[in-house]
Image (cartoon, helix red, strand yellow):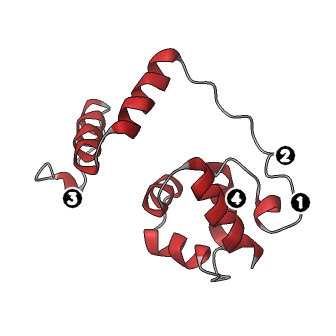
Amino acid sequence: MIISARVRARIAALNITQSELARRVGVTQGAIAKLANNDPNGSSYLHKLARELGTTAEYLTGETEDPQEGSPPVPQLSADQRELLELYNAMDDASRRSLMHVARSMGGEPLRASESAFA
């Protein structure tokens, strides 16, 4: 199936995990895994998925061959944002979780149940 192959390819190209993509889209990691493994029942969030993968639903479904055709422009990051992203990418998983906990608390988001013990 075209969708699953292209979803896997875009995840790899962006160097993100299925879990991270699921968080961004607002679905479970299992939903992303099903879609990446040829389950055809993922169309209800295909546009959100495409946006997070930096492409379009048309590309994921095989209507076009160019992943950039019609996709929104890549947002430009400031020097501070790029540095923060580079530092985040260099961290291990435990450090990333800790940083996200701090960032969410500073941003005014309520703590998630998984963060209550500051994993």
Amino acid type, mark 2:
Gly
Q: Report x, y in % for residue 61.
A: 79, 68
Tag 4 near tag 1, CB within 8 Å: no
Tag 3 near tag 2, CB within 8 Å: no
Q: Which residue is mark 2?
A: 70
Q: Report x, y in % for residue 109.
A: 30, 41
The single residue placed furthest to the left in the displayed view is 117
Quadrant assignment, res 74: top right
Q: Report x, y in % for residue 24.
A: 50, 52
- Report the front residue among 86 and 55: 86
Amino acid type, mark 4:
His
Tag 2 near tag 1, CB within 8 Å: yes
Cα separation, mark 3 vs mark 2, equals 38 Å
Given this view, does label 3 or label 1 mark the residue nearer the observer? 1
Mark positioned earlier in the residue sequence (3 or 2) = 2
- Report the front residue among 25 and 93: 93
**Label 1: element kind:** loop
**11 versus 14 height, above or below:** below
- Report the front residue among 96 and 48: 96
Amino acid type, mark 1:
Thr
Q: Which residue is mark 1?
A: 64
Quadrant assignment, res 88: top left
Cα separation, mark 3 vs mark 1, equals 41 Å
In percent of the image, x 58 and y 48: which residue is there? 14
Mark positioned earlier in the residue sequence (4 or 3) = 4
Cα separation, mark 4 vs mark 2, equals 12 Å
Given this view, does label 4 or label 2 mark the residue nearer the observer? 2
Q: Which residue is mark 4?
A: 47
| Left or right: 58 in relation to 75 | right
Cα separation, mark 2 vs mark 1, equals 10 Å
Mark positioned earlier in the residue sequence (2 or 1) = 1
